[in-house]
Amino acid sequence: MAEATKVEPIPEDVDMTPGEQPEQQAEEFEDEPDREKIKLLPQATSEDGTCASFQIVEEDHTLGNALRYMIMKNPEVEFCGYSIPHPSENLLNIRIQTYGNVTAVDVLQKGLQDLMDLCDAVEDKFTQRIREL
């Protein structure tokens, strides 16, 4: 996974006219991903790895639906679905089944990378349009 960044809110007294950037730097976390963020559920994983269920903590429908959409665009994926077990629990369960040429873990990694690439492209286009104003 790509590195995560924590962005501080921009103070209200900062003038953000087009073309200017805030002087605050985003605090970056280490390159190592949080191993507790995504868990493979072994009781719901096939022996060959083509079917697997994952649990992602501290996430909800915002990531779930976007990630499901990106994963389903992969032609190697037979099924992908997600659920939120209970509204009071901040957990996201996602199930991936492939046709057998790739593993569900590989598909999840590709889906996350594709979603990050899409977000980067949207951010670049948005920033470009703001600078044109």
Image (cartoon, rainbow, N blue to C red):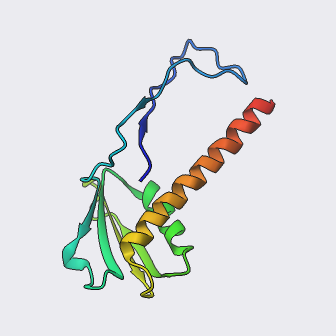
* Residue, far top: 13
**Residue drawn at 57 percent across, 50 percent down:** 119
Q: Considering only vertical position in the picture, is 115 above or below 132?
A: below
* Residue, far right: 132
Instruction: Quadrant for residue 91, please give it.
Output: bottom left
Q: Considering only vertical position in the picture, is 63 above or below 52?
A: above
**Residue drawn at 63 percent across, 43 percent down:** 123
Q: Position of residue 17 (x, y in %)?
A: 70, 19
**Residue drawn at 43 percent across, 80 percent down:** 102
- Is 121 positioned to the left or the right of 71 in the image? right
**Residue drawn at 51 percent across, 17 percent down:** 11
Q: Quadrant where the N terminus lies?
A: bottom left
Q: Quadrant where the C terminus lies?
A: top right
* Residue, far bottom: 99
Q: Position of residue 27 (x, y in %)?
A: 41, 28
Count of numbered circles on the image: 0
Q: Position of residue 104 (x, y in %)?
A: 38, 75
- Is 59 positioned to the left or the right of 8 in the image? left
Q: Considering only vertical position in the picture, is 31 above or below 110?
A: above
Q: Position of residue 38 (x, y in %)?
A: 30, 58
Q: Considering only vertical position in the picture, is 119 above or below 41?
A: above
* Residue, far left: 43
- Is 117 positioned to the left or the right of 85 in the image? right
